[in-house]
């Protein structure tokens, strides 16, 4: 059992840890692990981002393609597109991804009362996050949670 090594904060109100009590991925944050790259701990689960080869672009309706691509590369059966809030947290972990796009990323959150706009997060410094028209082009990458 290793102690918590450091607590990193996110502007979205989450904390993620570089190491924690219990088993840890082999090389820490950014390590190849669980079918992708280990990016941190949120709500007691290790978060894994899929490989950049599985990333897709296009409208929000293509979201299942990102999940299917991740599943084809690492058949874990639990890949998903994160909510707007969860995706906001992952922005703080982008340095642990294998790569990321300069274009916004779709979340799985549809704007309440308006099924034509979806939450999108731009990973570039000093960039805004907003509700985008669901047919606009943006990127999508699947994630998974590993509960230890």
Image (spheres, rainbow, N blue to C red):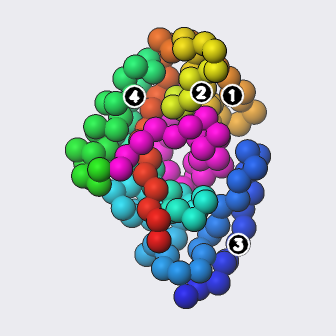
The disc label shown at residue 120, or none = 2
Q: Residue under label 4, please give it.
A: 63
Of the numbered discs 2 and 3, the one sitting upstream in the chain is 3
Q: Where is residue 46 in the image (x, y as percent from the top left)?
A: 50, 62
Query: How far is disc 1 from disc 2 in space, using C-alphas?
Result: 6 Å
Image point (39%, 64%), residue name = 33
Above-or-below relation of 143 to 129: below
The disc label shown at residue 6, or none = 3
The disc label shown at residue 129, or none = 1
Query: How far is disc 2 from disc 3 in space, using C-alphas?
Result: 29 Å
Find out whether the residues at labels 1 and 4 contact each other: C-beta distance under 8 Å: no
Q: Position of residue 89 (x, y in %)?
A: 64, 47
Image point (44%, 17%), residue name = 59
Query: How far is disc 2 from disc 4 in space, using C-alphas?
Result: 13 Å
Query: On the image, which quarter does residue 31 sit in?
Result: bottom left
- Front residue of 104/87: it is 87
Find out whether the residues at labels 4 and 3 contact each other: C-beta distance under 8 Å: no
Q: Where is residue 97 in the image (x, y as percent from the top left)?
A: 50, 51
Local crowd at mark 3 within 10 Å, few (<14), some, or many (≥20)? few
- Specify the segment rendered in magenta: 78-105
- Front residue of 38/147: it is 147
């Amino acid at each position: 059992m290793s102690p918590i090594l450091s607590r990193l904060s996110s502007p979205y109100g989450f904390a993620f840890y570089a190491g924690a009590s219990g088993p840890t991925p082999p090389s820490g944050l950014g390590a190849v692990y669980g079918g992708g790259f280990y990016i941190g701990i949120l709500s007691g689960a290790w978060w894994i981002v899929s490989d950049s080869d599985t990333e897709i672009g296009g409208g929000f309706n293509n979201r299942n393609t990102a999940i299917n691509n991740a599943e084809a590369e690492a058949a874990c059966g639990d890949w998903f597109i994160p909510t707007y809030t969860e995706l906001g947290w992952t922005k703080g972990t982008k340095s642990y991804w294998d790569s990321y796009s300069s274009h916004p990323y779709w979340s799985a959150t549809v704007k309440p009362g308006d099924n034509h706009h979806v939450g999108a997060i731009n990973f570039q410094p000093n960039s805004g996050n907003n509700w985008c028209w669901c047919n606009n082009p943006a990127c999508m990458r699947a994630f998974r949670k590993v509960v230890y």
